[in-house]
Image (cartoon, grey):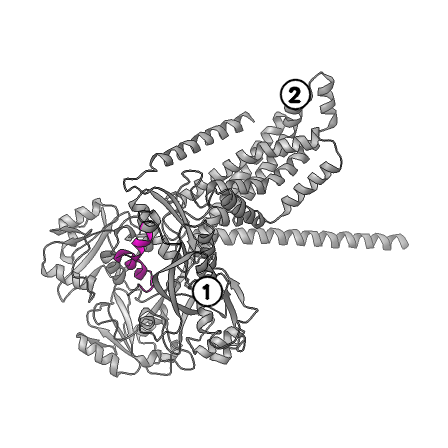
Amino acid sequence: MEISRSTRKIHRREKTAKAVIWGLSALTIFILFWIIGFILIRGFYSNKEVRYDFTGYTEETIPLDDQHGVIFVAHSKLRIKDITTEDLQTLYTSPIRELNTWGDFTGQDIYCKPAVYLEPSEFNSAVQKLLLGNSALDDWKSYTVKKNSSEEILEYVGNTPGGLGYIPAEDAYLIDKKVQIIPVRDMVLQVNPSVTDIVNNRSLQAVTMDQLNSILRGDVANWNQIDGPELPLVLGLSSSINLSEQLDGISHSVTAMDSRASMLSFLEHTPGALLMSRFGDIDTHDFELLSVDRIERGRNLTLAFILEKPAGGDAGGISYFIINTLILIILTLLFSTPVGVMAAIYLVEYAKQGPFVRILRMGTETLAGIPSIVFGLFGRIFFVKILGLGIGFLSSTLTVTLMILPTLVRTSEEALKAVPKNLREGSLAMGATRFQTIMRVVIPAASPGILTGIILAVGRVVGETAILLYTLGSGYDLVRNLSSPARVLSLHLYLLFSEAVSFDRAFATATVLIFMVLITNLLTKKLIRKQSVYS
Amino acid sequence: MKKIMLVMLVLVAALTLVMANGQGDGQGESGFSGSYAFGGSTTLEPIFMDVNTVMEARYSIQLSYDAPGSSAGVSGVLDGTYPIGAASRELKAQEIEAGAVATPVGVDGVAIVVNKDSVAVDNLSIQQIVDIYSGVITNWSDVGGADAEIVVLNRDEASGTRSCFKDSTVKEAGVDFVSDAIIVTSNGDMVSKVGSTPYAIGYCGFGYIGKDGGTKTVSIDAIDPDEENVVNGSYAISRNLNVITLGELADGSFEKFYLDYMLSTEGQQIVKALNFIPLN
């Protein structure tokens, strides 16, 4: 009776212990997969809501008048989804050639090379009015290329990376594979001021594309259905707009207007008026634009992102940062490994074990545990300022070396200590000197442990941000010499996130970092296995 | 071990090549060469980034810009870390005494931003802003929003945006900032935190409006934060964007050339394109 009760108790304990251990380990595994999975999914796919002054409806041909239209074309390598008329204006009128890149629109660091019709034909002046609007610019920028016919424009755009041009819609049959047609978003929303009135500190700022679709289908009768004021919604449409391609059923109770005057008076005199018109139809300063929120989905981490050279935070790729990271790792290892391993050999093999060594050991242990930002502070003051090395690669490499040195010394020390004493004694007994014993017997035996230490150090270097923030600067270029400011992956990731440059790019960079660490780990596992077999 | 050494050797050789290549094209035809690290205000960062891009495309120089904040920019200029610094506030008396010189390159307003999805409020009076930032109003329902605690975000003390915001709001009202606000370290940090924190309110330079999709601006006393309203003086919170140097720059130096470019027509077009307000 007594025995069986205690046995049962033990059984119960066993079971609970097993359940708890199982549960906790399952939780750990779940958390690990959840984090990695989240980062990888966000790294590969993006899904975000973006606010524009333009609606999301695209057209390949923008009508200039009743019969004529214009088609915008670009070099086929550009990753354009669609573009607004305002962005086209920017591309055609950007005053500084070096800043006129496709970066903001396609993420590619390619100069925009706009081309126009030279002939002051009716067509050209109509497009010029569309692109230059009422702005004071009376001529194209000096770097704009002038051409005489559709054929010439297409040839130029097709053979020029970053080329941008336009042709009359009736010449569309000339378009070949070397150019792509850019879908243009030209429609904007304007409202009667009563719609955006501030009531109790609130006002309507934007509608989503879904809401706009239902407005156009006639499903929204009152602004309060879409978080607006209590006001009937009156829809007006510029007669140049034809949405039959984008929407299957458009509301029949729409007032179509064809003159600027009628649109203006509609907006001015109709409470709750919503006018969808073309960007160039009426002066945008007269009435405020109602913004449109559009959900954009797409691939995030692409091969191009990894391979292209960086150009600012929101354009180009990260290839230079990957190379910079590798160079940083190699340089710090070159500086730290010999020193660290030697120090460990001294501490284990040569030094007399006494208070001095104990203090040394405690010192390295403390240093190994100090947050890296303290090293960053030290590096900024000592290397950058006192030694005058400036913000750049040398200062940061030296500081990072100092940071990983204690870890390296400690792990190497443990590895050396783990070598059995009788190995050393055997070697010494055979007449080998102390140095020979260390070089030929102890170090080979300890090498898997030392390597593990080095790999841990690599891990810390890859993930280091605080030090680099203070000592490396943030240049976008490849490291060219030891004094150049640069970026590495972790720093780039931090800056992308903290400067709100782009969450998408931050996650894509994070994914690359994860894979880099994964590859390093796999490589070392292999190395260590080989080394163990060898020794 | 031998293999590792071999790999290391190859990598070192590659590295030497890369660096030798870098030194090869160090000298440009313009006469300017080398690398320069500038730094300071986070508000001026986009301007410096664009000017750096233009300069690097035209001359063989390498430029970088760190953004630790206006005060750090001024002290960086004074201790020689940065040949050119930037501050989005005016210099203090002791900084001028130490030799710092400020040259305005543009004007900027400070916009109030809130979390777009959770905050329904689109307008605040200047008094309500003062009350929120001094801790008198702590719930959105007091200013027309949902019944939720206001998450107040403030900038660090090195920030010129903070001192400008402070001067035209809480300081003018004779009160102090609420002490338990979340402190963020840059304009970018501000908009990304406001964009990702429900019920958050913060402030940033005009150049950062719309940089984070999760934020929206709030008008102040029904006046929208835009260039027009700053120029005509109706918008309450604005300041100069200053480039900081140690004394006057020497003629013919790259630093002088750089600053002159910022003040040129082209430089001012860059300032305008970034949603700041050019001089004149």
Residue holding disc 1:
B195
What residue range appears in magenta?
A: B257-278
Give the percent coordinates (x, y) of residue A64: 16, 64
For the view shown, which residue lies furthest in the top direction?
A431
Q: Nearer the viewer, residue A179 or B54?
A: B54
Kindly report the secondary structure that dominates the magenta region of the rendered protein: helix
Residue A81 shows up from this direction: yes
| Chain letter behind tag 2 | A
Q: Is residue A521 left or right of residue A152?
A: right
Q: Residue at x 86, y 53 (%)?
A: A4
Q: Secondary structure at mark 1?
A: helix
Give the percent coordinates (x, y) of residue A411: 64, 37
Q: Quadrant of residue A169?
A: bottom left
Q: Secondary structure at mark 2?
A: helix
Give the percent coordinates (x, y) of residue B104: 35, 61
Residue holding disc 2:
A436
Asked whether the residues under marks 2 and 1 belong to the same chain, the reply is no
For the view shown, which residue lies furthest in the front direction?
B97
